[in-house]
Image (spheres, rainbow, N blue to C red):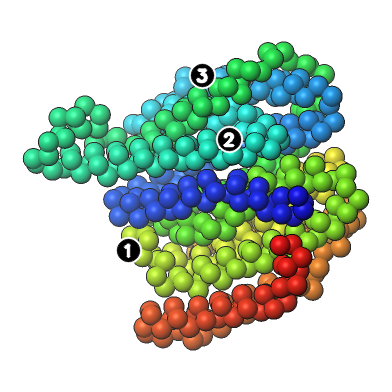
Amino acid sequence: MNPLKKLASQTAIYGLPTIVGRLLNYLLTPLYTYMYTTSEFGDVTSAYAFVSFLLVFLTYGMETSLFRFSQTEIEKEKVYSSALISLLLSSFSFVLVVSFFSTPISETLRFSGHPEYIIWFAIVLGCDAIAAIPFARLREQGKVKRFAIIRSLNIVINIGLNLFFILFCKGVHDSTDSCFKPFVELVYDPKIGIGYIFISNLWASAITLLLLSPEIISVKWKMDLIIWKRMMRYGLPLLIAGLAGMTNETLDRTLIPYLLPEEIGKSQNGIYGACYKVAILMTIFIQAFRFAAEPFFFSQSKEKDSKETNAIIMKYFVIICSIIFLGTTMNLDWIKYFVGEEFREGMGVVPILLLANLFLGIFINQSIWYKLTGQTGYGALLTIFGAIITISLNFYWIPRIGYMGSAWATLICYASMMIVSYFLGNKHYPVNYDLKRILGYLGLSLTLYFISLFIKTELIAINVLLNNLLFVGFVAVVWKKEKNNFKKLA
């Protein structure tokens, strides 16, 4: 198969459960934002921001290490078993320690009175960390269908339980004459409130790990310390890079509640978290691409035209991201109704976050240079550089302009990382990117977006029509410029 077709097909398969799941989760956003206050949703936003940090810490670069050493080691089973045993031991220890200190941790994170939230999240993190290695092996082996099925089931369970507890059980509990009331009283406690979002996640993660049990049980339970040490040396810079990267991605949602007065901070965090979800399509595509691209780039690195392939992929990646950027921003006039009314004041962050994530996607695409050359320390330095920008700008801007400061900090951080990574990559692993087309498409998409701001009318329907005419115009320009290349790939 043409390597670009292979990458596209695998991105689609990896992305299908992610796309469907994220879209369904996106459809849960109205449920959350209409059922809970901005302050309550702020707690949910803050909790998942902390979880993102900890999951990177608990996997400590073992996924990428598995890809790297599976390419070089004769005995792949030793690589897999060493990684899996390592994560089993560290995850189990983490769950025990966090459960023991759940009360002081809950008070520190302002979940006072709910230490059970901390225990639930510790178990979720432990399950997800362990599951990362079987999932990585499925990707490494190209078993995309099994990967997609299990991911899809995780999403279905999580969403199904959210609907069951928050919509069905709460509705029955609040009614006076439902025949389901005796059953609901056995399984539902209104005092748990937003905790049912976390319980749904817990069950989904536990069942996912159970579904991956064939990959876990079949392992040869032998840890090769020599291979493990090499994997750790390779992976630890990626851990630092991952933590710094997660700082760039989620630090804002952990700082907002602390850098503003408590109730204002929680409310602003809820608004910001809800509007962040409106930029979901960009995040979905980048995540799907990331799942497929990492093993793809490693497998293609031995081909003589691998750099040319990388350049072509970058151009099409930017085209798709530009289409997502325009498609979302041009339709914000109606998309905003997916969140509750009190959340809509934050919609101004959406274009900023979309562009920020577009730059992040380009950076991820570029970052393969330091992974292929084994210079993972550069990855750590780049993301630490970004983290310094993120931390500095968030501390400066949040007390002054609230969540808008966080959005701008995210954009500046990812733009800076992308630019610096390009010049470093050009020195150590030069790829001849088609900068003229790439910058041209980015510039055109931004120009059309700014034009849309100046042609707004009082009628939403007219705005949507005019905006989408601009969007269609962009797609037409891309088709005219690229149709011959598209035909070659067909």
**Disc 3 to disc 2, C-alpha distance:** 31 Å
Graded by Cα atoms within 10 Å as few (under 14), some (14 to 19) or many (20 or more), the crowding at tag 1 reads: few
Graded by Cα atoms within 10 Å as few (under 14), some (14 to 19) or many (20 or more), the crowding at tag 3 reads: some
Query: In the image, 298: left or right of 479?
Result: right
- Labels 2, 1: front one: 2
| Residue at the disc numbered 1 | 341
The image quadrant of residue 442 is: bottom right
Q: Which mark is residue 146?
A: 2
Could you tell me which residue is drawn at 80 percent across and 56 percent down? 310
- Taking the image as drawn, is residue 255 in sight? no
| Residue at the disc numbered 3 | 96
The image quadrant of residue 445 is: bottom right
The earlier-in-sequence mark between 2 and 1 is 2
**Disc 2 to disc 1, C-alpha distance:** 40 Å
Badge 3 vs badge 2, beta-carbon distance below 8 Å: no
The residue closer to the viewer here, 9 or 433, is 9
Q: In what element is the residue under mark 1?
A: helix
Q: How many marks overall?
A: 3
Q: Amino acid at mark 2?
A: Arg
Q: Does 456 appear above or below 356?
A: below
Could you tell me which residue is drawn at 75 percent across and 58 percent down? 313
Q: Amino acid at mark 3?
A: Leu
- Labels 3, 2: front one: 2
Task: List the single residue furthest toward the left.
Answer: 177
Q: Amino acid at mark 1?
A: Glu
The earlier-in-sequence mark between 3 and 2 is 3
**Disc 1 to disc 3, C-alpha distance:** 41 Å
The earlier-in-sequence mark between 1 and 3 is 3
Q: Position of residue 394 (x, y in %)?
A: 58, 55
